[in-house]
Image (cartoon, helix red, strand yellow):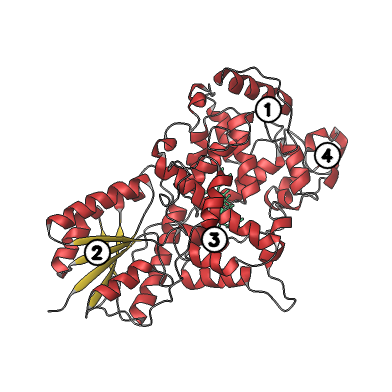
Amino acid sequence: MTTTAVVWLRRDLRVHDHPALHAAIAAADAVIPVFVIDEPLLAGRWPSPNRVWFMLQSVASLSQELADRGAPLRVLRGRPAQVLPEFARHAGAGDVFVTRDASPYGRRRDRAVAERLAASGIGFHARTGLYVHEPDALANAEGRPFGVYGAFRRAWDAAPRRAVLPAPDRIPGVPGAGDAVPDLARPTADPSRIPTPGEAAARERLAAWLDPGPGGRAPVDVYADVRDRLDLDATSRLSQDLRWGLLSPLEVVERALGPGDGRRVFVAEVAWREFYAHVLWHHPGVLDAPYLARFAALETRDAPDDLRAWAEGRTGYPVVDAAMRQLRAEGYMPNRARMITASFLAKHLLLHRRLGEAEFMRHLVDGDVASNDGGWQWTASTGTDPQPYFRVFNPVLQGRRFDPEGRYVRRWVPELGRVPDSHVHDPWTLDAAAQAAAGCRIGVDYPAPIVDHAEARGRALAAYGSARGAGVGAPDEGAG
Ligand SMILES: Cc1cc2nc3c(=O)[nH]c(=O)nc-3n(C[C@H](O)[C@H](O)[C@H](O)COP(=O)(O)OP(=O)(O)OC[C@H]3O[C@@H](n4cnc5c(N)ncnc54)[C@H](O)[C@@H]3O)c2cc1C
């Protein structure tokens, strides 16, 4: 009798280094790849047309790869706990294989699906693939989760890694056509500014990032020196590929490892992604409450106009505005810009970080609950191993340091096009004649700062200080 296995694809939209796909091929005579359009999830807590668009375009590209290898993709719609077991039963499948998910929603969903499948005598098998080391695989000497990145990183480095798997040449499918992938979302960002969806494009990005050119160096080799520079576009731009599993993080790390600081620091960043997945796995409550309980008492402001000015890039601080406008236009922002804008919302504006997290999740093509919440809580000083609460980034100094000639801010804030380099990060300090000469009259062509840095910093220190029951007066680390 022919045995059939279903491979249910989710955020592992690739054929290279795919343990669940390999396991299904080994376990059954016929393999049916399935993607479920999880309608409740698409409209859930963090809806984002940019992500849905990128995901479905990537599914369409995967569908072609699978069909070429002999196993057309089936596309279902609805609640996975309902439609997936129903499909598996009708297909006569004995087993369902998945790549193990780590988000609180993913874990709940998979438990529900596994139970329904078990009731029909169908096995549910989860394999690794979203992380180099699974979020629950590492523990400290007492067997407890890590709360500090440095210690996590040492364990992460030391743990043995499995071998990277090749893409299968053939997948034994079942006869019949696959399903078309519906086109359900128009991105709010400009699609020509979003990296091309699909595994093939992601693999080209990876090669361009890691493979040495004629000079013997690859972009990754200078990463350590330039990754924070906003004007240079000097990071990998692989985050959406890791988010959607177009690339296997294990393959990325194995190919990146090598001599030099650039490669070392790049791998360390991939490990940050795994640290935040580890934190979320062990503390799913962080999505609703701060990791550091003492900051639950932090009194934030209710200021919808300030929130709107921040989200729309109208705060009057060029580096903040440039970054927020980039987020809307590209569904992306470099890490340094995420830290500056998150700090501005959480500290300068003293708004609840959750409002900022939601705005990021609305736009980010790489939006990932673990990394996003981890990054926000780090910046807002409420998370694991965060920056100290008294560290309030000074947006002018951050701009000068990481965009020294103002090229990044001029790219996104054309109002500043003719403002001299010396004032491009604080145009309000130009006198009226110089503002007029530069075509950037503050309050007319470009907004005045919505808060004064020193006052806002004082307000944040007071609020954080009283929430943690400590005094203020800590050193200013404004230069970041
Ligand atoms: C407030 C805030 C929110 C963030 N939200 C997200 C998010 O929703 N999704 C997301 O993937 N990253 C998030 N990050 C992390 C980081 O900003 C992005 O991963 C990075 O900017 C993506 O660009 P890149 O691929 O060129 O990164 P690179 O600098 O080339 O880094 C390589 C890879 O390492 C991982 N990585 C790098 N830095 C971090 C980090 N600090 N935390 C976790 N992973 C990291 C990413 O997968 C990235 O693709 C956030 C950071 C902050 C401060």
Instruction: Compare marks 2 and 3 and give the one earlier in the sequence.
Output: 2
Tag 2: amino acid: Val
Residue 47 placed where, x, y %? Answer: 41, 47
Tag 1: amino acid: Val
> Which element type, helix, strand or loop, lies under badge 4?
helix
Instruction: Compare marks 1 and 2 and give the one earlier in the sequence.
Output: 2
Distance of label 2 from label 3 (alpha carbons): 33 Å
Ligand 1 closer than 8 Å to label 1 CB: no
Instruction: Compare marks 2 and 4 and give the one earlier in the sequence.
Output: 2
Q: Nearer the viewer, mark 4 or mark 1?
A: 1
Disc 2: which residue: 96
Disc 1: which residue: 451
| Badge 4 vs badge 3, beta-carbon distance below 8 Å | no
Q: Residue at x 16, y 69 (%)?
A: 91
Query: Would you identify the image quadrant in which residue 474 lies?
Result: top right
> Which element type, helix, strand or loop, lies under badge 1?
loop
Residue 181 placed where, x, y %? Answer: 33, 67
Res 436 label = 4
Res 59 label = none
Q: Nearer the viewer, mark 2 or mark 4?
A: 2
Distance of label 1 from label 2 (alpha carbons): 55 Å
Instruction: Compare marks 4 and 1 and give the one earlier in the sequence.
Output: 4
Disc 3: which residue: 194
